[in-house]
Image (spheres, rainbow, N blue to C red):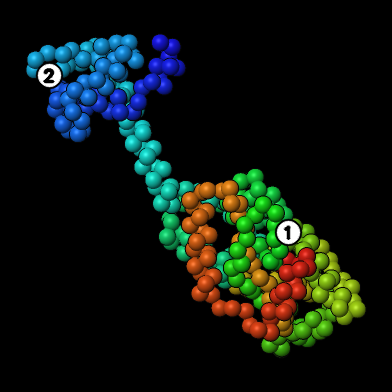
């Protein structure tokens, strides 16, 4: 029999019966231990010997003993069973999300807020799951999700993305970042019209372009095209530039947990950003499913946005504006 046909003909039970017979030294005792009648047990052993083309046992009145071929095969048979057993335990652990790997795209700060709490609870519940966080713009996240290179992404807005599942999760207020000696520093909140003549700064990297477009769109209503300078620095260095009076910038609420000398955060009246989760229905990673369920559970108990912000949120979701 060709080797491929021989391998396909051998079933896992053949190997399990063989190891049991070798350990018990008797077909009758091995069959009783497994719960198989002696005659059926013996037939399976003969089938295995036929497929292998070699006798595995010497039969005698006292039971059975291994032939030379049987002794050679026993070590490998035990290794096969151990490997399959370990594999089954591993897969079962993945199914329970005890182990695994999940890649998450983010477009918001994880310094505080809903996303930070979601990740904290997820790590607490599934400490053995490896989490990779990828910071990029929504279009790149969606591309990776479609290619199953990313399990989920958390982005701003409420638009539908083709080939992606979407679930609204939370909202954040929008804050302007001011130098501590700015003329608006004494206010509890500011309005867009008060920012119309200000100079702004944004990052070159995401979400810099989206912040730029967001500012242009919001301030155009007051007849001004804002002066916006692109800074070739990372997020962690953009806010200190505000303290140096290089310009103002805007961030979402989660980012306000980051404290830098010389700056203040002030909410912009009526501005709120909705955030949602995106993922592919084709992705059956159990770690992803657990993350989505946890997010859904948290969203049900989260505080809704203030009534004055709902209209602004709906309008903003239609624009290109998306923040840190």
Residue 257 shows in this picture: yes
**Residue 307 position by quadrant:** bottom right
Q: Residue drawn at (71%, 82%), measured in percent from left and top?
A: 270
- Residue under label 2, please give it: 63
Q: Which of the image's four quarters has the N terminus?
A: top left
Q: Whole-percent x and y of residue 306? A: 63, 83
Q: Is residue 286 toward the left or the right of residue 115 in the image?
A: left
> In terms of depth relative to the viewer, which is nearer, 61 or 103?
61
What element does badge 2 sit on?
strand
Q: Residue drawn at (60%, 63%), measured in percent from left and top?
A: 167
Q: Which of the image's four quarters has the C terminus?
A: bottom right
Q: Whole-percent x and y of residue 111? A: 58, 67
Q: Residue drawn at (87%, 71%), measured in percent from left and top?
A: 227
Residue 244 shows in this picture: no
Q: CA distance from mark 1 to mark 2?
A: 74 Å
Q: Please state which of the two labelled residues, at mark 1 or mark 2, is closer to the viewer.
A: 2
> In terms of depth relative to the viewer, which is nearer, 192 or 242?
192
The reply to whether dot 1 and dot 2 touch (C-beta < 8 Å) is no
- Residue under label 1, please give it: 206
Q: Whole-percent x and y of residue 301? A: 50, 74
Q: Whole-percent x and y of residue 281? A: 58, 51
Say few, some or many: other residues with alpha carbon within 10 Å of mark 1 (under 14 / 14 to 19 / 20 or more): some
Q: Is residue 195 toward the left or the right of residue 278 in the image?
A: right
Q: Is residue 153 toward the left or the right of residue 245 in the image?
A: left
**Residue 11 position by quadrant:** top left
Give the number of the disc on residue 309.
Answer: none
Say few, some or many: other residues with alpha carbon within 10 Å of mark 2 (under 14 / 14 to 19 / 20 or more): some
> In terms of depth relative to the viewer, which is nearer, 173 or 96?
96
Mark positioned earlier in the residue sequence (1 or 2): 2
């Amino acid at each position: 029999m060709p080797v491929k046909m021989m391998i396909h003909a051998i079933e896992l039970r053949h190997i399990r019966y063989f190891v049991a017979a070798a350990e018990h030294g008797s077909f009758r005792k091995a069959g009783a231990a497994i719960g198989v009648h002696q005659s059926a047990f013996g037939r399976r052993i003969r089938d295995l010997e036929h497929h292998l083309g070699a006798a595995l046992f010497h039969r005698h009145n006292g039971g059975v003993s291994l032939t030379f071929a049987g002794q050679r095969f026993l070590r490998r048979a035990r290794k096969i069973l151990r490997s399959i057993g370990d594999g089954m335990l591993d897969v079962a652990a993945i199914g329970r999300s005890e182990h695994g790997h999940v890649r998450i795209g983010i477009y918001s700060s994880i310094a505080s807020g809903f996303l930070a709490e979601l990740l904290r609870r997820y790590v607490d519940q599934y400490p053995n799951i490896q989490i990779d966080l990828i910071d990029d713009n929504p279009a790149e996240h969606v591309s990776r999700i479609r290619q199953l290179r990313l399990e989920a992404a958390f982005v701003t807005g409420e638009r539908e993305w083709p080939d992606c599942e979407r679930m609204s999760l939370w909202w954040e207020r929008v804050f302007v970042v001011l130098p501590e000696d700015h003329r608006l520093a004494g206010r509890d909140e500011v309005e867009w019209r008060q920012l119309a003549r200000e100079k702004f700064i944004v990052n070159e990297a995401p979400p810099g372009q989206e912040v730029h477009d967001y500012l242009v769109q919001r301030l155009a209503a007051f007849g001004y095209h804002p002066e916006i300078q692109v800074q070739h620095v990372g997020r962690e260095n953009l806010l200190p530039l505000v303290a140096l009076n290089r310009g103002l910038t805007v961030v979402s609420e989660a980012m306000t947990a980051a404290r830098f000398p010389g700056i203040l955060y002030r909410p912009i009246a009526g501005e709120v950003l909705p955030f949602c989760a995106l993922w592919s229905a084709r992705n059956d990673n159990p770690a992803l499913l657990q993350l989505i369920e946890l997010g859904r559970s948290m969203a049900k108990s989260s505080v809704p946005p203030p009534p004055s912000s709902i209209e602004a949120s709906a309008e903003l979701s239609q624009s290109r504006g998306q923040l840190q």
